[in-house]
Image (cartoon, rainbow, N blue to C red):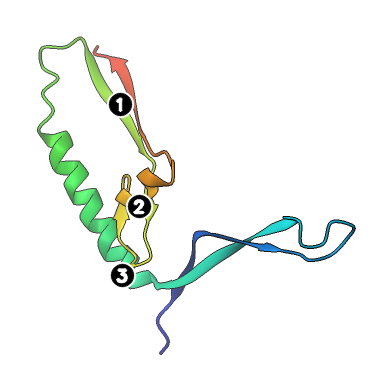
Amino acid sequence: MREDEILVTMGYNHTDLGVGLNAGNNQAVAIPVVKKISSKTIGKSLNSMIRSVSLVLDNCDTSSSSFEINEIELSLTINADGEVSILSVADISAGAEAGVTIKLTRKK
């Protein structure tokens, strides 16, 4: 049985179309660089990320605050090896952004 794969865009290559009045003059088109990654590999890495985030949250002490964490939203990246992270080193140099959104509610 074939293992399921997920297509992940790893970036873009630019190529000159070489057509039109300005042929050869930077009439570029962006072509996505796509890689197939095993769904099992991504799943293992995602599970590891969830465990790590859970450990961090378990250590958050909100007992002295009038607020509690209600919801957390993570922006994750997947690299060419299928590793899931909040922000990879490669993405930092490319100017990519990732973030964490935390929604707080007042304790009752």
Query: Which of the pair 11/14 is nearer the observer?
Result: 14
Residue that mark 1 sits on: 70
- Name which of mark 1 and mark 2 comes first in the sequence: 1
Give percent across and percent down for residue 13: 57, 62
Residue that mark 3 sits on: 41
Binning the other alpha carbons within 10 Å of mark 3 as few (below 14), some (14 to 19) or many (20 upward) gives some
Mark 1 or 2: in front is 2
| 65 to 56, vertically: above or below | above
Residue that mark 2 sits on: 90
Query: Which of the pair 94/48 is nearer the observer?
Result: 94
Q: Amino acid at mark 1?
A: Asn
Query: Which of the pair 83/92 is nearer the observer?
Result: 92
Would you say 30 lies left or right of 11 here? right
Would you say 70 lies left or right of 56 here? right
Give percent across and percent down for residue 48: 21, 56
| 52 to 21, vertically: above or below | above
Q: Residue at x 20, y 9 (%)?
A: 66
Q: Residue at x 38, y 48 (%)?
A: 91
Query: Quick one: SS at disc 1?
Result: strand
Q: Amino acid at mark 3?
A: Thr
Query: Which of the pair 30/100 is nearer the observer?
Result: 30
Give percent across and percent down for residue 51: 18, 50
Would you say 78 lies left or right of 6 here? left
Query: The N terminus lies in which quarter of the figure?
Result: bottom left
Instruction: State how many labels appear.
Output: 3
Query: Quick one: SS at disc 2?
Result: helix
Dots 3, 1 in contact, CB < 8 A: no
What is the number of the mark on residue 18? none
Query: The C terminus lies in which quarter of the figure?
Result: top left
- Name which of mark 3 and mark 1 comes first in the sequence: 3
Q: CA distance from mark 3 to mark 1?
A: 30 Å
Binning the other alpha carbons within 10 Å of mark 2 as few (below 14), some (14 to 19) or many (20 upward) gives few
